[in-house]
Image (cartoon, helix red, strand yellow):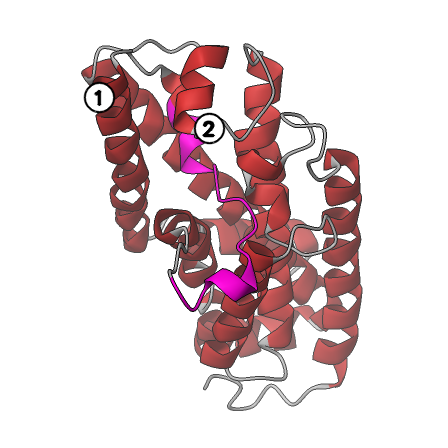
Amino acid sequence: MNLPKLISHDLRCGLLRPRCLLIPIMAALPCWLCHKIAVTAGFNCGWGGYLMYCFMGIEPINILDTMEKTQLPILWLLLISGCLYLNLDYMLNDLSLTGQQIIVRSGNRREWFISKCIWNLLSCGVYFIIVSATAAVFSLFTGGDLSLRCEGAALNILYRGEVDAGTVSSFTVLAVSLLLPYLTVSALSLLQMTLCLVLKPILCFLLSEVVLLVSVYWSSPFILGNGAMGIRSGLLTASGVDPLTVCGECVAIMLLCAGLGTWEFKRSNIIGAKE
């Protein structure tokens, strides 16, 4: 099998699985909370507002304050971790079913792993499409519109006055609430999949969670997780993380994972690879 056929197999078997039905449920939770805030404040939240709230994140937590109160962004962690969890087991499951036969027929381990990388990126894309579609439906059913722009007054209420931006354009909303979170989650998902070649899947998932928790406490474009927090974005506040640095870091991690993963998979023992 050549690379296009391998990709076709992965898209057919791994892209739209029954577990995708969980995505609208996870996305509806922050949307519901956003609607409650908007109703209390007396304004209608549109599509852009819901997306911005879903990937708001939180300002860095002072470690010295954690003894008194914990302010973990539970819904943000759920939404980001959801994609990582849904993508966690496909590669090893496929390897334990038909993957070994496909590798023998194709004779090319490199293309098999590259196909899994492409599947991973597309699977993350489908996740964000479903999240954004859920936000759009929520907006329509709560009296909002499908405009991606977000008014400055509404954004200040949703972000608790932590940003210094005025009315946010559609491009900024797409960048802050879709592009940067997508790149961040994709980089983490590829890193997680690559680590699954040498570690148990559950351990890889826990390591991904540790990275996200570290990003909750430290604001830096070099810590994966910060790029998926709108409240820390340099597009919304002068002291925020640089979006170009976030993009460069995520792309670099993706390329590094593809290269190292291919090298490790070519030399690994694939018999009994599933754990």
Residue 196: tell me if it is visible: yes
The residue indicated by pointer 2 is 52
Label 1: which secondary element = helix
**Which range is magenta?**
50-68
Mark 1 highlights which residue?
A: 40
At x 72%, y 28%, the residue is 238
**Residue 269: percent from left, percent from top:** 65, 90
- Local secondary structure at mark 2: helix
Residue at x-position 30% and y-position 54%: 19
Q: Position of residue 73 (x, y in %)?
A: 41, 50
Q: Amino acid at mark 1?
A: Thr
Q: Nearer the viewer, mark 2 or mark 1?
A: 1
Q: Compared with residue 111, is residue 35 higher up or lower down, i.e. above or below?
A: above
Of pointers 2 and 1, the one earlier in the residue sequence:
1
Whole-angstrom CA distance, mark 2 to mark 1, is 18 Å
Does 227 sit left or right of 123 as displayed? right
Q: Residues within 10 Å of mark 1 (few under 14, many from 20)?
A: few
Q: What is the crowding at mark 2: few (fewer than 14 residues within 10 Å), some, or many (at least 20)?
A: many
* Residue 102: in magenta span: no
Foreground pick, 79 / 218 = 218
